Amino acid sequence: MADLDPAAVGLRAEHMIKTLASISAEPNRLVRTFLSPEHRAAANLVTQWMRDAGLGVSEDALGTVRGHWAGNSGKRLLIGSHIDTVIEAGMFDGPFGVVAGILAAEHFAKAGRKLVFGIDVLAFGDEEGVRFPATLASSTACAGTFDSATLELADAEGVTLSEAIIRYGKRAADIPAAAYARSDAAAYVEVHIEQGPVLEYRNQALGVVTSIAGQTYLNVEFLGEAGHAGTVPMLLRRDALSGAAEAILLAERMARDTKSEVLATVGHLDIPAAASNVIAGSVALIVDIRSGSDTARQQFVDHFKTELRAIAERRHLGLSITTTRDVTTTPCNPAIQDGFAAAIVATGGEALRLASGAGHDGTAMAKLCPIGMLFVRCRGGISHNPAEYASPGDMGLAVAALVKFIETFKP
Ligand code: GLV
Ligand code: MN
Ligand code: MN
C-alpha cells in the first residue's frame, strides 16, 4: 500500500474544507445549524466525498452521515466530528475532523486493505448546540443515550426538534436505531483543531488530548416590569436588563477569582421587547460554565445561583434558572492517548499532551466506548471566529498520524 503524502493530503483537506464552508445560510458569514437546509446540503456533499473515497454510506434519523469501510470483524473504529457551525463560524471547527476521517479511511479503502476492525466515519450535525437549547443530539443518538425530552425543545422560530426532524425528512421513531451496539463500537476518535494557543506556543503541529472539560449551561431569565424610559423614576424601576447586566459581570468576576480554573461566558442575551425607550420587562441569558475540575465547576454553579437570587431579590425581579446542560469532564482513554502519541512521534512530532477546554462529540460517545482525540495547531488559538485557520501542512500531518494510529489500533 502506497505511503500517504502528508503535503498532498493536507492540500486536499484544505480544498474540501473550503468547499464545505461555501454552504452557509448567509452570504457573508458561515452559519450552518442543525437540521437546516444548509445542513442537508453539507450532508449531501459529505455523502459524495465518502462514496468517492470508496466507503458505503448511510444516514441516521438525526442526520449523522456514516461512511463505512468493512473490516474482518464486526468491531468498528468510529472516527467523527461535526458539520454544524456556530453563527459567523470559522471553517475548520468540526469539518476538519470529518475530512480527516474520510481521507484516512480512503487510504485503506482505495488500497482495498481490510483491517481486523471496520472503520465508520461519522459526520455529526449537532455539536455546537446553536439552534436548540440542547446539544449533541446526533452523537448521543449514536451512543444510545439520546434524551427524548429534547424533542420538545424549540428553536428561536418556535420550531421544535421533533418538527425539524420531520422537515429534514426523518422520523423520531427511528432514533433508537441510530445507536451502536456496545459490542461493535471498539473506540471513538476525533481529530480537531485545538481552538487554543498551546500547540502554536510549543511549536508543535499535533497534540494528544487528555480530557474534555465538563460544562454547565444555565438559562437564566430575569422578570421585571416594562415601563416608559422617560417617566418611571429610577428608584421605582424593576429593570430586568440591569439585573442581567449585574449577572453577566458577576459571572466574569467569579470566574476570574478562580484564576481560570473555571471559565464562565455569557454569549447570548435575549431582550424580547428591546427598544431604546422601554425599561426591559424581561431578559434571558445563557451562562456557559466550564472547567476541567467537576468539583470546581459544581461549586461555582452553586455559588453563582445563590448570588443570582440575591441580585433578583435586591432588584425585586422574578428569576428562573434552568440547567440545560450538565456534562462532567470526560477523560480520554490512556491506551488511545498512547496510540496517538506514538503516531505523532512517527510523523516527526513531540506528542504533547493537553486538555480540551472546548466541548466535543466525544463527551457523548464516551458513554458508548473508549474515546480519544488528536489536536491540530490553529493560528493564534483563534476559533469560533471567521479568522480560524489551520495550515494544509499541519492538516496533512494530522491525517498521516490518524492513519498511523489506525494501523496500530487494537480493538
Ligand atoms: C463547542 O465548540 C463548544 O465547546 O461549545
Ligand atoms: Mn468542534
Ligand atoms: Mn465549536
Image: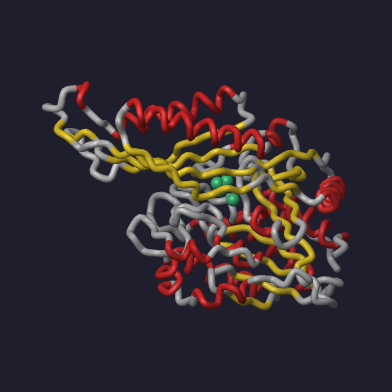
- Please give left or right for residue 102 compared with residue 184 in the image: left
Residue 272 % position (x, y): 27, 45
**Residue at the image position 30 percent from the left and 34 percent from the top:** 240
Q: Nearer the viewer, residue 100 or 409?
A: 409
Q: Quadrant of residue 122?
A: bottom right
Rendered view: 331 above or below 370: above
Nearer to us in this view, 11 or 167: 167
Query: Can I make out residue 283 in this image?
Result: yes
Position of residue 365 in the picture relative to residue 36 (left or right): right
User: In the image, what residue occupies the spot 65% across and 46% down?
Assistant: 328
Quadrant including the C terminus: bottom right
* Quadrant location of the N terminus in the rendered image: bottom right
Q: How is the image coloured?
A: secondary structure
Task: Using the rendered view, name the quadrant where residue 116 is placed.
Answer: bottom right
Residue 263 percent across, percent down from the top left: 57, 33
Q: Decide which of 361, 150 is in the foreground and name it.
A: 150
Q: Seen in the image, is 69 located left or right of residue 92?
A: right
- Can you say whether 40 is above or below 93 in the image? below
Number of numbered tags placed on the structure image = 0
- Name the residue furthest left: 231
**Residue 393 visible here:** no
Residue 228, position as x, y percentages in the image: 14, 33
Q: Considering only vertical position in the picture, is 119 above or below 232? A: below
| Relative image position of residue 368 (x, y in whole percent) | 71, 62
Q: Residue at x 20, y 22 (%)?
A: 234
Which residue is rendered at x = 75% and y = 38% of the image?
204
